[in-house]
Amino acid sequence: MTDTSTTGAKVRELTLRAILLGGVLTLMFTAANVYLGLKVGLTFATSIPAAVISMALLRLMSGGTILENNIVQTIASAAGTLAAIIFVLPGLVMVGYWQGFPMVTTTAITMLGGILGVLFSVPLRRALVVDSDLPYPEGRAAAEVLQVGAGSAEGAGENRAGLSALLWNSIVAAGFTLLTQMKLAGAEVARWFAVGSGATGVAGGLAFALFGVGHLVGLSVGMAQLVGLITGWWVLLPILTQGGVGDPETLANTVFRADVRFFGAGVIAIAAIWTLMKIAGPVLGGIRSAMAASRARQGGHALAIEEQDMPIAWVFGGSLALMLPIGWLLWSVLAGGPLAGSSMTLIAGAILFIIVVGLMIASVTGYMAGLIGASNSPVSGIGILAIIASSLLLLGLLGRAGGEEEINAMVAYALIVTGLVFGIATISNDNLQDLKTGQLVGATPWKQQVALIVGVIFGSLVVPPVLNVLNDTLGFVGTPGAGPNALAAPQAGLISSLAQGVLGGDLNWTMLGYGALAGVGFIIVDELLGRAGKLRLPPLAIGIGIYLPMSVILPVIIGAVGGWFYDRWASKRPNAGFAHRMGVLTATGMIVGESLFGVLYAGIVAGSGSDAPLAVVGDGYAPYAPWVGLLLFVGLVGHSYHRTRHMVVETP
C-alpha cells in the first residue's frame, strides 16, 4: 500500500494503520455529529480535528508521513458530511412511515448515496481543483495543519513560528468556546427592533471558526454574502413582517424561516444552474483529460502522482453498477405498499433522476465547497431543492390523484430518493475539499478517493444504530409519543413538510419564484462587475448569504474584511509569502480549536443528557453574557492578529 512516485521514492500513504485510525475516528465523529445535528441542526467539520489527532498518534509510531496523515483526515472527513443524512431520514419517522430506522435500508441509503458522491466528483477534480482559482478555505486550512505538523519536526524557523500560531489560536478558540458553554460568555450578540409594524435585527455569532473561514474565503465571497445578508434581513424582512404579530425577535425569525429562506433557496437554485452552465465546459474538459490520462496509464506511460485519479472506466462502471442495488432498495421500499403497482415506472424515474440530478448537484456542491468551504455550504438548501424536484417527479409520474395513504407513500418515497441524492451532495461537497488538501501536500488523488469510500462505509454502519438509540430514548419533535427532551431535527422537519406541501399542493412557490428572479439580477450584476474589472460578487455566495441565518453569515463577513486588512499588511512585508502563510495559519488555528472542542463537547452532551452540561451560572447572568462575550471575542481576535504580526516581524 505504498506509492512509488515518478522519482522512484516510496512514500507511506494508503497504509493499513491509516485506514484503521481513520475508520475509528469516523465512527466516533459520525456518532457525535448525528446527535449534535439532530439536537441543534448543525454539524461540525471533522477533517481538521482528524488531521490533528492523526499527527499526534502517528508521531508516536515510526515512519509516519504527511501523506499518511492526509489519508486519515480524508477518511474521517466523511463523518462531518455523511452525518448530514440526518437532515432527511428522520422525516420518515416524523411522517409515520417508519417507526424506527431499519439497519439494512438506512445503511444502504447512506452508503449508496455516499459512494456515488465520491464517484461523481472524481471527474470534477481537474476542473474545480487543478484548473480553478476557488479558495477552498477548509482544504487549504487542513493542508496548512498537515504541512506545519510535518515541518515542525525539521525544526525550521518559519515552521516553528507557524506551529506556534496554529497552537496558540487553537487554544484561544477552544478556550473561548469553553467559556460560552459555561455560560460565562455569550455565543451570540443580537438586537431585535421594530421597523414600522414589522421587525428585523442584527445578530452575530461569536465563533472563531466562522471568523477564520471568513479570512480564508476572501473579500469577494465575503462582500457577496454581505449583499445577501442585507437583501434578506434589511430589505425583505422589514417588508414581509409588516403587520405581523409578536415581539420583534419571534416575528423576524418566524418570517425568515417561512419566507426569506425560500427566497434564498430560489436564488441558490438559479445561481446553481448558472454555475453549472459556466463550469460545464471545464468539467467536460476534465473528463476528457481523465480519459486521456487513463489511456496513457494503460499504454504504460508513467503519470505524476498528482495526475493519478481513479480510472475513469472504474468511475463510469462503478456508477452504473450501483444502480442495481439502488433499484433493489427502491423496489423493497415499494413492495407491498399502495404504490407497488407503479413500481417499474417509479424505479426507472428515480434512477434517471439520481443520475442526472446527482451529477448536477455533485458539480454545484463541489463548486460551493471551493467557494466557502464544506462545512459552510448550504447543503440543506440543496436538500430543499432536491425534495421539491423529487416530489415534482412523482407528481409527473403519478399525478395528485389518490387518497391519504397514497400521498403518504409518495412523501416517503420522495424522502428516500432525496436521501440518496443528498448523500451525493454531501460527499461530493467533501471530496473536492479533501482533494484540494491532497493537491497542496502532494498526495495521490486515487488513494484519497478510495480512502473516502472507506470513510463512507465506516460512517454508514454507525448512522442507523445511533439514530435508533436517539429515537427510542428521546424521539423527535412532532412525532407521536415524543418526550419533553425530544430532538428538534429542524432540517428533517422542514424537508418532510416540503414534500407534503408539494404533493399536497400548498408549497410556498411565490418566494421561491421571487428568489429565482432576483438570482437572475444578481447574475447580471456579477457579470457586469467582471467585465468592468471590479470586485466580483458570486451570485451563489449571495444566495447563501440570504439563506443562512445572520448569526452564521455576519462573522464570516467580518472575518473576510479582517483577513483582507491583514493580507494588505502582509503583502508589504519583505517576507510577504511567509506573512500570508502566517495569516492562513492564524485563521486555521481558530477553526482547529473550535472544531476539536466541538468533538469533545458533543461527547459531553451525549454522555450527560443535559442541554448545558458545563453551565456554571444561572439565568440571572444571561443578560450580561453576550456583552462579556463580545468584548472578550474582539479582544482575543485583535490580540491574535497582533501576535501573528509580531512573529512575522521577528522571524528572519
Image: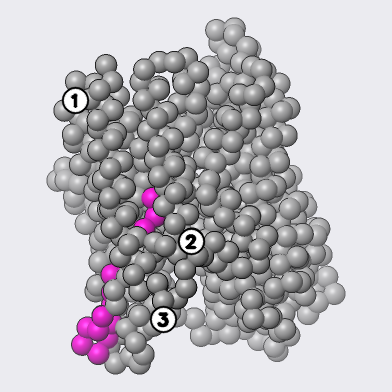
Which residue is disc 2 drawn over? Answer: 182
Under circle 1, the secondary element is: loop
Return the residue nearer the eye: 235 or 184.
184
* Residue 331, quarter of the rendered image: bottom right
- Compared across the picture, whether 603 is left or right of 323 comes to left
- Asked if residue 341 shows in the view, the reply is no
Image coordinates of residue 367 in percent, x first then y, are 43, 46
Q: Which secondary structure lies at badge 2?
A: loop
What amino acid is labelled 1 in the image? Arg
What amino acid is found at the position of numbered circle 3 in the picture? Thr
Q: x, y (%) of residue 426?
A: 56, 52
Does 200 lie within the magenta span? yes
Q: Position of residue 95 (x, y in %)?
A: 67, 79
Which amino acid, by three-letter code, is at mark 2?
A: Met
Mark carried by residue 254: 3
Q: Quadrant of residue 121?
A: top right
Numbered label attached to residue 573? 1
Q: Are marks 3 and 1 in contact (CB under 8 Å)?
A: no
For the residue pair 255 and 146, the one nearer the viewer reads as: 146
- Mark 2 or mark 1, which is nearer the start of the sequence? 2
Name the side, left or right, on which 569 lies relative to 612.
Answer: left
Q: Which residues are drawn in magenta?
A: 193-209
